[in-house]
Image (tube, rainbow, N blue to C red):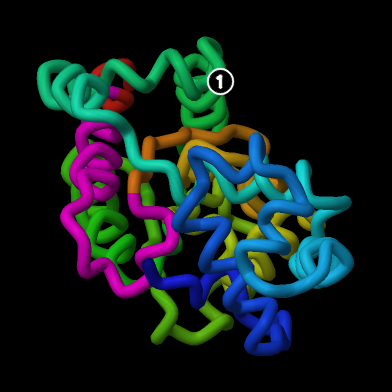
Amino acid sequence: MDLTKIVEGKKLNETELTILTYIVDHIDTVLDQGVRTVAKENYTSPSAVMRLSKKLGYNGFVDMYYQLLPLVKRPDQDEEIRHEANPLHDYHRFNDPSAIDDFVEILSANVDRYIFLYATGFSGIIGEYMYKKFLVNGRRVLFASGQDSVGILENNINHTGVFIALTKSGETKNIIEKISYCKAKSIPVVVFTNEIDNSCSKLADIVFRIHDPEKLDDRHMQSNYFFAETMLLFEYIMSFI
């Protein structure tokens, strides 16, 4: 498993990387093993395990386990079958029941102002689809990605009614910056992201959470229905607009 997303900027040494790899590979049993057993299995000390948790920004071993669990745990086969049978079955499990109504209300209150869509990478493909869908429905909309000038948002902020961001990880720096900028200007922010709390979801006024079974796959090499479900959820939302 690619641990780049977890260790980026943490400056872990070789022993700490070994411990982290062991924890991820044995995520189903490490909590029962405890700190001492994990340390013993990696020929190191319990204090080394605790230092790892602190370096990663967690309060301790147990906190590290529960924070890593949703990042590395794959759904079981029965869960995947249920998911394929009803792709939107996770919507009510992960989302506020009032989210769609709140979103529709914001759009209705800002019908003469721009919807500003922002997405990069693979999310940009979905963002462009949303942009065209809003256009054919007669809405005023702007779309920008990572390659576009920051001036597009700044020069149109006074005419923007809602800012919509698409981010699989919820931790993309330039998206966080743009959300913060919009919040400072009292622009409502809507985020489509994965199902666990992240920097973008914590800042947003409305969050649409989509299950992402490959949260550490930044290169999008694994089979993943996150982007397909984002588009499906968007079409479902559009049926209320």
Q: Is residue 128 above or below residue 60?
A: below
Q: Position of residue 30 (x, y in %)?
A: 60, 45
Q: Is residue 231 visible?
A: yes
Q: Secondary structure at mark 1?
A: helix
Which residue is disc 1 drawn over? 102
Is residue 235 positioned above or below 142 on the image?
Answer: above
- On whether residue 108 falls in the magenta region, the answer is no
Left or right, residue 224 beside residue 39: left
Give me the residue at 56% from left, 81% from top. 150
Quadrant of the rendered image containing residue 39: bottom right
Q: How many marks?
A: 1
What crowding class fits label 1: few (fewer than 14 Cα within 10 Å), some (14-19), or many (20 or more)? Answer: some
Q: Residue at x 52, y 68 (%)?
A: 21
* x and y percentages locating residue 192 in the rendered image: 45, 44
Residue 42 higher or lower than 127, as above or below? below
Is residue 187 in view?
no
Q: Which quadrant of the view contains residue 90?
A: top left
Q: Is residue 219 magenta?
A: yes
The stretch of residues the image draws in magenta is 214-236
The quadrant the C terminus occupies is: top left
Q: Is 232 in front, or is 45? A: 45
In the figure, is residue 186 to the left or right of 65?
right
* Percent position of residue 202, x then y: 71, 44
Q: Residue furthest left?
A: 85
Q: Using residue 130 as the reference point, say whether residue 186 is left or right of it.
A: right
Front-lying residue, 117 or 96: 96
Residue 196: image location, x then y, percent: 56, 40
Q: Residue at x 38, y 21 (%)?
A: 91
Which image quarter is the N terminus in?
A: bottom left
The amino acid marked with disc number 1 is Asp
